[in-house]
Image (tube, rainbow, N blue to C red):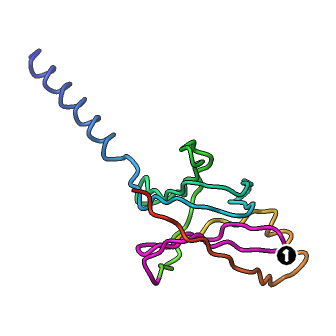
Amino acid sequence: MKKKILLSCSLLVLAIMLAGVSTQAQTLGSYDAEIPFDFTIGDTAYEAGDYIIRVKSPNYLATVLEVSSAEGLELQSTAITKNGDRSKNDQARLVFDREGDHYSLRQIVAPGFGFSTLKTRELVTVVEEDNPQPDPDTVSIVLKRRQ
């Protein structure tokens, strides 16, 4: 009887450990980005500089954009939504909307995927009050695939 209980407990622990390994986030892409202007992602502002951009899918229902400093310090993780756009060439890129001197990340597009970020409440409010149909400039930054 003790052997059956011990075997059952061992199998349960093994199953839990394997389940933990299988739920780790799958990285869809990891890139280096040199961004020459200050920008925002959602409600978070960043200065011009070098960043590491990762697209991760922790499960089948969500995709996350992870932004890290060039040294690898994670700065932000934010939900992104699939948009169906894909890069027409082999280059991944970040697409920013520019309104005046304000740049906000709109998309990340790569050969295998395209995702959009969520608009900030502040930007949506300003756009609705000042211009019901905004026509922002679009600026793209080419990304370098990380090894």
The residue carrying mark 1 is 128
Q: Residue 135, how many percent across, how many down?
A: 78, 84
Q: Does residue 9 appear to the left or right of 83 in the view shown? A: left
Residue at image location 13% in from the left, 24% down from the top: 7
> In the depicted view, which residue is nearer to us: 123 or 45?
45
Quarter of the figure with residue 35: bottom right
> In the depicted view, which residue is nearer to us: 108 or 129?
108
In reply to whether residue 44 is colored magenta, the answer given is no
Q: Residue 81, how many percent across, how many down?
A: 55, 67
Dominant SS type (magenta):
strand
Q: Residue 28, how many percent across, how many down?
A: 41, 61
Image quadrant containing the C terminus: bottom left
Helix, strand or loop at disc 1?
helix
In reply to whether residue 103 is colored magenta, the answer given is yes
Instruction: Give the total of numbered labels.
Output: 1
Image quadrant containing the N terminus: top left
Residue at image location 83% in from the left, 69% down from the top: 101
Q: Residue 79, how many percent across, how many down?
A: 57, 58
Q: Does residue 34 appear to the left or right of 135 in the view shown? A: left
Q: Does residue 30 appear to the left or right of 37 in the view shown? A: left
- In the rendered structure, which amino acid carries the disc numbered 1? Glu
The stretch in magenta equals: 88-114
Q: Is residue 28 above or below residue 11?
A: below
